[in-house]
């Protein structure tokens, strides 16, 4: 794990040579959403991660064809990515679109949006940063909602906010229905971001990062 994060840190330092606020998509798939986002907001630096090499290859082709210098993709586990971020790089927006719902109850622990992960995100996100979550699993959505009262570092915005960019992703097109949630980073201090037992990355043919 130490070597993996060190290698990833070197790659990220090349992308982010100086402190910078970024837009981060977890489970970017083939890059459909983030490519569109980067084109709409050319002054925002965007980076997507996914565990499947084939997805990242296709996503990179999209950004190259579109000449999107503000859009990057890299194969990485979400926790490894956080711990490898260069000093001074912060998460201004975090996107989690249609992550693997791990529908079986005994597998719920594998879902990425857990209390420890919210705490890890908070350590890299300044006050007023946004997290955008969308899922076609009502069970997953309700589970995240149930977590909110216990979270001091994330909350629902006090005023209703529009979804910044509507773009029908592959999973969204397949979904009969879906739910969306916007969270804002509070000013509450973050605890240590270190998670002692990060999940082992699933096989590359899994739906999206856990």
Image (cartoon, rainbow, N blue to C red):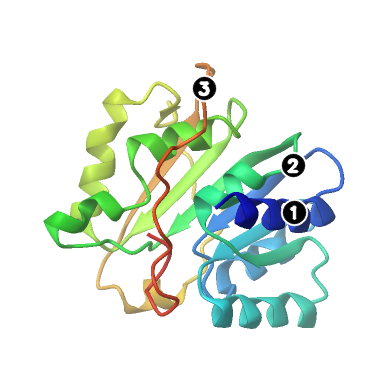
Residue 35 picture quarter: bottom right
Counting residues from the start of the chain, the first of labels 1 and 2 encountered is 1
Q: Residue at x 78, y 78 (%)?
A: 64
Q: Residues within 10 Å of mark 1 (few under 14, many from 20)?
A: some
Give the alpha-carbon distance from disc 1 to disc 3, as whole Å. Answer: 23 Å
Relative height, residue 168 to residue 132 (above, below)? below
Judged from the image, the secondary structure of the residue bearing numbered disc 2 is loop
Q: Residues within 10 Å of mark 2 (few under 14, many from 20)?
A: many
Judged from the image, the secondary structure of the residue bearing numbered disc 3 is loop
Residue that label 1 marks: 12
Which numbered circle lies on residue 81?
none
Q: Residue at x 33, y 79 (%)?
A: 174
Counting residues from the start of the chain, the first of labels 3 and 2 encountered is 2
Q: Is residue 15 left or right of residue 147?
A: right
> In the depicted view, which residue is nearer to us: 27 or 195?
195
Residue that label 2 marks: 86
Asked if labels 2 and 1 touch by Cβ distance under 8 angstroms, the answer is: yes
Taking the view exactly as shown, the residue that stands out farthest to the top is 188
Q: Residue at x 59, y 25 (%)?
A: 127
The answer, for residue 113, to whether it is visible in the render is: yes
> In the depicted view, which residue is nearer to us: 46 or 52?
52
The answer, for residue 160, to whether it is visible in the render is: no
Screen quadrant of the C terminus: bottom left
Q: Is residue 196 left or right of residue 139?
A: right
Residue that label 3 marks: 190
């Amino acid at each position: 794990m130490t070597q993996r994060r060190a290698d990833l840190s070197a790659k990220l330092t090349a992308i982010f040579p100086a402190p910078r606020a970024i837009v981060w998509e977890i489970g970017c798939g083939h890059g459909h959403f983030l490519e569109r986002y980067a084109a709409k907001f050319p002054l925002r630096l965007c980076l997507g991660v996914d565990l499947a090499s084939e997805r990242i290859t296709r996503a990179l082709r999209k950004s190259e064809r579109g000449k999107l210098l503000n859009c990057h993709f890299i194969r990485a586990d979400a926790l490894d990515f956080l711990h490898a971020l260069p000093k001074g790089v912060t998460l201004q927006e975090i996107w989690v679109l249609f992550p693997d719902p791990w529908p079986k109850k005994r597998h719920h622990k594998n879902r990425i949006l857990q209390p420890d992960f919210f705490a890890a995100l908070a350590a890299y996100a300044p006050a007023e940063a946004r997290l955008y979550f969308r899922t076609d699993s009502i069970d997953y959505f309700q589970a995240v909602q149930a977590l909110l009262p216990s979270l001091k570092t994330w909350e629902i915005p006090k005023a209703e906010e529009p979804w910044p960019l509507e773009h029908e992703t592959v999973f969204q097109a397949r979904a009969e229905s879906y739910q969306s949630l916007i969270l804002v980073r509070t000013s509450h201090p973050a605890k240590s971001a270190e998670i002692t037992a990060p999940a082992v990355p699933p096989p590359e043919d899994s739906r999206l990062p856990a």
